[in-house]
Image (tube, rainbow, N blue to C red):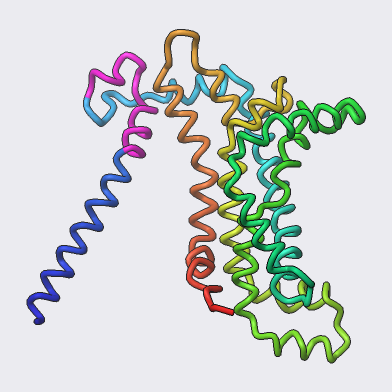
Amino acid sequence: MRARRFVGRIALGVALVGSAALMLVPWVWTLSTSFKHPNDVFTTGLLPSPPTLDAYQDVVTLIPFAGYFGNSVIVTVSVVVLNVLFDTCAAYALAKLPLPGKGVLLVVLLTTLMIPMQVNIIPLYRMMVAVHNAVPALGADTLSGIVAPSAVSVLGIFLMRQFFVSIPDSMLEAARLDGAGEFSILWRIVVPVSWPAIATLVIFTGLTAWNDFLWPLIVTASDGSRTLPVGLALLAKKNTIDWSQTMAGTVLTALPMIVLFVILQRRFIEGLTQGSTKE
């Protein structure tokens, strides 16, 4: 039995290492290509020979990289903050407040997850155009037009609700007996014990907002409001693609999210493994 368990563990370890290696191959190729000359992308081996930083210099100089990067930071931070605020409040109401019909409301919200985002693009764009016509500083071709449709996430509400359900009601009842209001209970008691779930929400929301391409492409029309993924697409020429520049832009775009995940990974794992208690 011990021998079988040992062989099983070895086989499992080999399978996990092999799977991890397969997933790392595209990232290694991307990083390697970003240091190659354009003519050497498909003619040399995996490692660049010799390595060069020309692609990174081109990315920074050929497009207003700093402006696109700043726009992406503003959009991502705004979306994350708004989602943490609104999703947390909605999840608390659905999990801990005696609201009539909240079960039906939750089912309706979850049903909206089955509607593809592409179906909503035209109505959302018309709404942003109407807002821009009324208030030129808002709506289409502004950062607010990118942020507004993502200010609330049904998936975020569901994630936070599932975590809040696992919090004992007795803790909240004790606070109510002491005269605390619902907002006070939420921000002073519930939120401090919910950092794993909040970290998970931050990572999911941040990744989605940072990497979003379709909606920013449609709703923006000038360099002043374009985000980094849209800006990097401008590097592509009409009939050719400079893969070194494209991969360099991909590496620069991915680095902030990698840093974010490294910082919050422990909380992220805790958030995925908690909050699964059944009602």
Measuring from the top left, give residue 220's x and y in whole percent: 71, 25
142 is higher (above) or lower (below) than 112: above
Give me the residue at 40% from left, 22% from top: 244
What is the chief secondary structure element of the magenta stretch? helix
Measuring from the top left, give residue 106's x and y in whole percent: 67, 63
Give me the residue at 68% from left, 68% from top: 103
Report the residue that reaches farthest toward the right: 134
Measuring from the top left, give residue 47's x and y in whole percent: 26, 31
Q: Which residues are magenta?
A: 26-44
Give me the residue at 71% from left, 20% from top: 221
- Counting the numbered discs, the total is 0
The image quadrant that residue 214 belongs to is top right
Left or right side of 63 for 26: left
113 is higher (above) or lower (below) than 31: below
Nearer to me, 145 or 93: 93
Magenta stretch: includes residue 38: yes
Magenta stretch: includes residue 35: yes
State the quadrant of the N terminus: bottom left
Give me the residue at 69% from left, 34% from top: 71
Nearer to me, 34 or 266: 266
State the quadrant of the C terminus: bottom right
84 is higher (above) or lower (below) than 185: above
The image quadrant that residue 195 belongs to is bottom right
